[in-house]
Amino acid sequence: MRMTSALPWTRSANMAFTLYSLIQTAILCTNAIAVLHEERFLSKIGWGADQSVGGFGDEPGIKAQLLNLIRSVRTVMRVPLIIVNSVCIVLLLLFG
Amino acid sequence: MDYSNQSGFRQRKLQPKFRMRGSAVDSSEPSQLFDDTSPGQSVVDKGQMAYAGQNLLSDPMSNLAMAYGSSLASQGKEMMDKNLDRFIPISKLKYYFAVDTLYVGKKLGLLVFPYMHQNWEVSYQQDTPVAPRFDVNAPDLYIPVMAFITYILVSGLALGTQNRFSPEILGMQASSALVWLIIEVLAVLLSLYLVTVNTDLTTIDLVAFSGYKYVGMIVGVLSGLLFGKMGYYLSLLWCCASIFVFMIRTLRLKILSEAAAEGVLVRGAKNQLRMYLTMAIAAAQPLFMYWLTFHLVR
């Protein structure tokens, strides 16, 4: 018996990363961002869209960029996400 | 230029050459991206096709049909090229493959030994970056693509020496390495967006920079095959250090502001954040290099 097989990190990493799992990850992450509700959740923790507008300086800052990103994902990806999620649900129901 | 009366596809092939010639400072040969021999070839083809046509069918109706068919084909090709150009910018991709042997040799040397190189600036030519053939600092896609394919083959070789090889493993290695590359490029794009860096780094540039680490990985795995674990660790350490220095020196000029890039210590939160970002991108390279190769060497 080889001693190295006892240590868990010396076994071969099962990196079965396929492109399909990347697509799944992308769909899940986009869903997670699109689900953050504007007035029920984001305003409560101070991340609302009206709470980030500072001056008109040239440095938006990381928080403002993040809020911008969340709001634009929600606006742009709403309809495509509905379509993609429906397709995913149908495919998973049919093929498991 | 009196090429306007010729058929569509020949005109399309000649147009990039025309644009290059218009934008170059020095004359003729060295300013073209590729040596285009299309006029010579297509003249010969057209002549042969016309000769064969006249032999087989010699009535005017079939000539008309042939002319109509060829014009339809050229229109279809134009439309397909135009639509494909919308998704994959083919003309921009051509810039990244305009390399020659001397550039590849110098760039590979720079990737494993970047410590003596003094001038890391990309030279420009009337607002467009110079083709990689003429500037060793310009990013290209030839080395990353070749290194990626070589990495997959070398990993197949390494797995074969441990009797762990099967043809599906090659496909899995390829797709998982590709997935890590995509994840890394997306992470870098996201962080560049969040830090609001005004840079001219395009997505393809980032793919090129992320692909340069495959050279170090190949060197590490090959020396691991030849000299065992010690050789693998030593060469991986060397390649990690050189990729780290290479990335920092290349990205410093693109991400940081002018004053900070020259080494002057510029205070301010913005420059500090950008410096952290550069170091994070550069530090991710050795991590990926180790993560993608340690299971190949026993």
Image (tube, coloured by chain):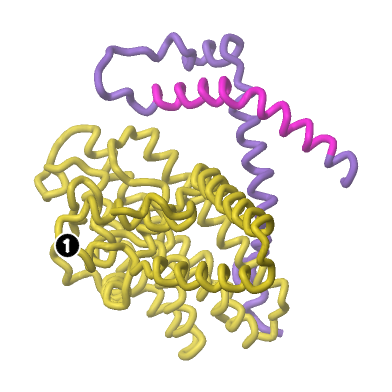
| Image height of B26 relative to B71, above or below | below
> Would residue B289 be seen by someone viewing this image from the given angle?
yes
Q: Position of residue B73 (x, y in %)?
A: 60, 53
Q: Position of residue B271 (x, y in %)?
A: 22, 38
Please indicate whether residue A88 sits to the left or right of residue B44 in the image.
right
What is the drawing colour of chain B?
Answer: yellow
**In terms of secondary structure, what is the magenta stretch mainly?**
helix
The residue to which callout 1 is attached is: B27
Q: Chain of mark 1?
A: B
Residue type, mark 1 in image: Ser
Q: Position of residue B53 (x, y in %)?
A: 63, 68
The magenta-colored residue range is A63-90
Find numbered disc 1 in the image and state the secondary structure of the residue it sits on: loop
Please indicate whether residue A86 sits to the left or right of residue B33 in the image.
right
Residue B105 quadrant: bottom left
Q: Quadrant of the N terminus of chain A?
A: bottom right
- Residue reaching furthest left? B264
Q: Position of residue B58 (x, y in %)?
A: 66, 66
In the rendered image, residue B236 lying in the magenta stretch gets the answer no
| Image height of B147 relative to B93, above or below | below
| Image height of B141 relative to B220, above or below | above
Q: Which chain is purple?
A: A
Residue name at image x 24 percent, y 39 percent: B272
Residue B50 quadrant: bottom right
Residue name at image x 29 percent, y 71 percent: B107
> Would residue A7 be seen by someone viewing this image from the given angle?
no
In this view, the residue in front, B6 or B36, is: B6
| Image height of B254 relative to B133, above or below | above
In this view, the residue in front, B213 or B67, is: B67
